[in-house]
Amino acid sequence: MKKLQVIFSDESWAQVESIYNKASEDFDSGSISYSDVINEIVLTSNVDIKTLQSKHIDVRRSLRSFASQENINLDDLIRTLTDLKGKPTKKRSRETAEVKHE
């Protein structure tokens, strides 16, 4: 068994709570914990790796990677930037931005 602290988005936590409440309702033959629910979600999930990666792309890191290459293929760079432009990016919180500037 492994313990790990995880931060859930509000939407994810609402889903966990909903499943927990449904599973616990009128279940008198045992007990179900939040860990049980989360383990079941993980074990039965089918994650699209490309979608997961696209949600967490760091544009600056991608550009640095391209800039460090000796032979830069401009067509590939333009295609990659176009793909990145169309992907939703993570928004930094105001607190994170303020901490970095101090």
Image (spheres, rainbow, N blue to C red):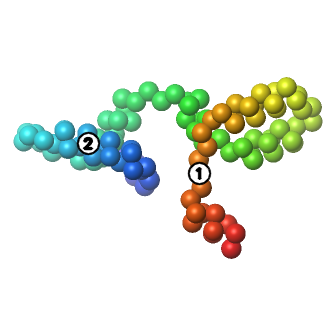
| Gap between marks 2 and 1 measured at Cα | 26 Å
Name the quadrant containing residue 75.
Answer: top right
Is label 2 or label 1 in front?
1
Q: Residue at x 44, y 53 (%)?
A: 7
Is the Cβ of the residue at disc 2 closer than 8 Å to that at disc 1?
no
- Within 10 Å of the Cα at label 2, are there few (<14), some (14-19), or many (20+) other Cα atoms? few
Circle 1: element type: loop
What label sits on residue 19 in the rendered view? none
Foreground residue among 43 and 16: 16
Residue identified by numbered label 2: 18
**Residue sitting at 74 percent across and 31 percent down?**
82
**As drawn, 10 above or below 74:** below
Q: Hey, which quadrant is residue 49 in on the image? A: top right
Q: Mark 1 is on which residue type?
A: Lys
Can you see residue 67? yes
Residue 81 x, y percent position in the rendering: 76, 34
Q: Going by the image, does 61 lie left or right of 15?
A: right
Instruction: Specify which label sits upstream in the sequence, 2 or 1.
Output: 2
Check the picture and name the quadrant holding the C terminus: bottom right
Mark 2: which amino acid? Ser
Expressed as whole percent of the image width and height from the top left, the position of residue 78 reads 81, 30
Q: Residues within 10 Å of mark 1 (few under 14, many from 20)?
A: few
- Residue hosting label 1: 91
* Of the pair 34 and 102, the residue shown nearer to us: 102
Using residue 44 as the reference point, say whether residue 74 is left or right of it: right
Element assignment for label 2: helix
Q: On the picture, is 40 further left or further right than 58? A: left
Instruction: Report the residue at 82% width, 32% height from top.
Output: 77
Residue at 16% in and 42% down: 24
